[in-house]
Amino acid sequence: MGEGHEFSPEGLEANFPVGLDLDSDGGQTATTIGEKEYVIGGSDDGAVSIGVRILDKSTGKWEIPMVLGMEPAPCRGHSAVLLNNDKILVLKSDSAPDDCIWFLEVDTPFVKTKKKILESEVVAWSKGVKGDGSKPVVISGPSGVGKGTLINRLMDEYPSSFGFSVSHTTRAPRQKEKDGVHYHFTERSIMEKDIKDGKFLEFANVHGNLYGTSIEAVEVVTDSGKRCILDIDVQGARSVKASSLEVISIFICPPSFEELEKRLRGRGTETEEQIQKRLRNALAELEQGKSSGLFDHILVNDNFETCYANLKKILDRDGSINAVCPPSESIKLPVGHSVSVMDQKVLIRCGKDEHGKASNSLFVLDTSSLKGGAPWRTRGLKCVRH
């Protein structure tokens, strides 16, 4: 571990302001790890942009890394401190209580993997939140199996315990569809860039349009204190399993293929061609879902009430189906504050309160139980005010 320090003028290019002053605009921090110095911040129209540059002290050369993850919004100033030699804790000053704690990962397993794949310098942002979040639930199954009905029943019975993530799509909104409610409607170029930047958990091209679940959409549900339900296909479930996200995965299957066909035809809403296409897709999904070890649990929806009861048993094994996690919280730091590290505790001393008055407040941030990390939130933070 180490401690953030003032920006050293030695070897710096002339266009970099020298020093760190948390009481003024244009502040930036520099944190050294081996032969590299990670410079965070810089002036941008009177505010501090959370940019990142790396100085290789052995060569004297600067490099702009590829930045992954959702980046922090600009702020008036920040402090930085090194944790475990693989991430930098960044504390934003004068920011919203749920937006002041961030981690810049510089040498974590996630970043190391991305460096090898991209063959370039990489850093990744992860938002820090207090407490733990519930594991999301992936529910998959072929069309017509009844998974939508099961999910709706679960949401109706436990509205304060479960929530849906809102998917993104590049298709045009249909009548009565609202942006941010039914889907996040976006431009193809924007979604393609976000996919490339690793901001999506899973995505697919369906009839020429992109559909996908963003990491942020899942985290927003978790931040609200609810367990996120992901209704996605087998391919999407495979993408989730390959990610670093810990989930409970459940596959819903029919009692027989013949029964599934009967249910699809019983809808009376599709043409024969559409039914045949759904049956072909269902056959492939059933084969993958049952035999690949992709899912933690497999439920047969022969009798709806029995299947629903079994679904609830799976979700209540940790006794949390009725529990509501408190929404993620954080702290609000004034521009004037200092930071130091003792073991795995970060001591934050506030020289002024949010109104600019002198303050002796001390926050102790416990980082000993961190979970998650880029490209997801970093959870497990504990904060005590003295």
Image (cartoon, grey):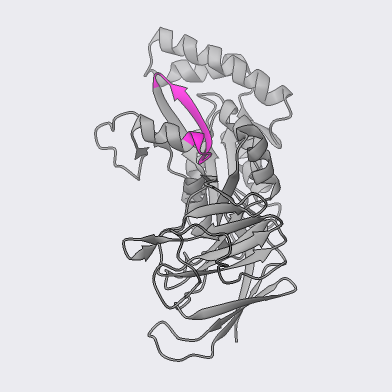
Residue 307 seen in this snapshot: yes
Left/right of residue 188 with respect to residue 261 in the rendered view = left
Residue 364 placement, left or right of 42: right
Residue 219 percent coordinates (x, y): 52, 51
Estimate the x, y position of residue 367 in percent, counting from the top left: 68, 67
In depth, the one of 265 and 378 nearer the eye is: 378
Locate the C terminus and report the quarter of the image it occupies: bottom right
Q: Position of residue 274 (x, y in %)?
A: 42, 12
Residue 249 visible in the shown view: no
Can residue 299 be found in the magenta stretch?
no
Q: Quadrant of residue 43?
A: bottom left
Q: Residue at x 54, y 87 (%)?
A: 361
| Tally of marks | 0
Q: What residue do we see at 46% from left, 86% from top?
A: 352
Q: Nearer the viewer, residue 165 or 29?
A: 29
Q: Which residues are magenta?
A: 195-208
Magenta span has 201?
yes
